[in-house]
Image (cartoon, helix red, strand yellow):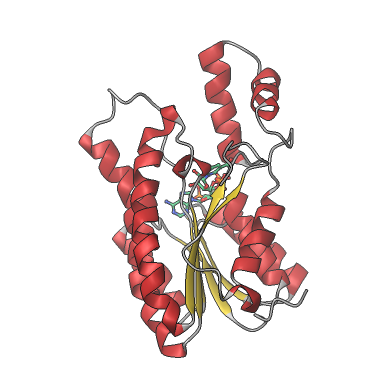
Amino acid sequence: MDLGIRGKRALVCASSKGLGKGCAEALAEAGVDLILNARGTEALEATAATIRARHNVNVTAIAADITTEEGRSRVLEAAAGVDILINNAGGPPPGMWSDWTRDDFIRALDANMLTPIALMKALLPGMIDKRWGRVVNITSQSVKAPIPQLGLSNSARAGLTGYVAGTSRQVAQYGVTINNLLPGIHATDRATSLDQGVMKAEGISMDAARARREASIPARRYGDPGDFGSACAFLCSEKAGFIVGQNILLDGGQTVATL
Ligand code: NAP
């Protein structure tokens, strides 16, 4: 299917690895020029080079911490006037409700709520002027089905979800859509570190920890970042202009709910 976005420009945050990289690859395959971002230079440059070679699109790589004001302003310098924004950042660590301090909450809110909001505030006006834009926020399955030990993530992402619910309805009249993609367990570094958490907590091997988590997914496997990216690219496509303010689960059926 031609997604109708060849020649558009996208900022994909936190995209040297994992789900962000999956989204970047899928957008590049659709002919979109990219601004990629991550903190570490090595993986970022490697991802940029691979995408350039494979898809023949322009790729600019900005090494910066997207959760800081300084990092965001450097990224925004390169990304002024983009048509597509994919919001992403690392997730907060797991823990126990009684241990989290105010500083822990502020860090989680900065990364997973206030950073995407700041980037939307910066880039939505340009999209509105052009009467076309797409924003996809990578959030989490935990927005619909909270994961108890990820309370920092549950809290910050619920806040972002509330903001998107209202804002998406304010900008849709200008041809700009905002939606959230909610990953369940996907085979990325983040999943490996959560497997390690299960391994330590339960005193079992890594293989056993992964097998236990896979068994909880009706599809009986972890998600593929490439498939996640394809769903993201579709939401960014010309065809998806009537999808507004939705929270779409990609979880292999793990969240048990009728609606
Ligand atoms: P990942 O494989 O660990 O990749 C994270 C990417 O983000 C890397 O490129 C990393 O590069 C970059 N990054 C992290 N913090 C950053 C920052 N402050 N500024 C700029 N770039 C940053 O993680 P993932 O699995 O793709 O997860 C992406 C998001 O989805 C996370 O918020 C995660 O909590 C959420 N999620 C993931 C899953 C899953 O199963 N994978 C499930 C639910 C939700 P650098 O480290 O070099 O910066």
Q: Is residue 147 above or below residue 71?
A: above
Residue sitting at x 46%, y 89%: 130
Q: Which of the 4 image quarters holds residue 106?
A: top left
User: Residue 147: where, in percent of width, then height?
Assistant: 46, 32
* Figure disc tally: 0
Most distant residue in the top direction: 203
User: Residue 82: where, in percent of width, then height?
Assistant: 49, 79
Q: Residue 80: tell me if it is visible.
A: no
Q: Quadrant of the N terminus?
A: bottom right
Q: Residue 41: tell me if it is visible.
A: yes
User: Residue 245: where, in percent of width, then height?
Assistant: 46, 64
Q: Is residue 207 above or below residue 109?
A: above
Most distant residue in the bottom direction: 130
User: Residue 77: where, in percent of width, then height?
Assistant: 40, 76
Q: Tell me: 29 left or right of 123.
A: right
- Which of 20 and 64 lies nearest the eye of the viewer? 20
Most distant residue in the left direction: 102
- Which of 250 and 112 lies nearest the eye of the viewer? 250
Q: Tell me: 240 left or right of 85.
A: right
Residue sitting at x 30%, y 44%: 107
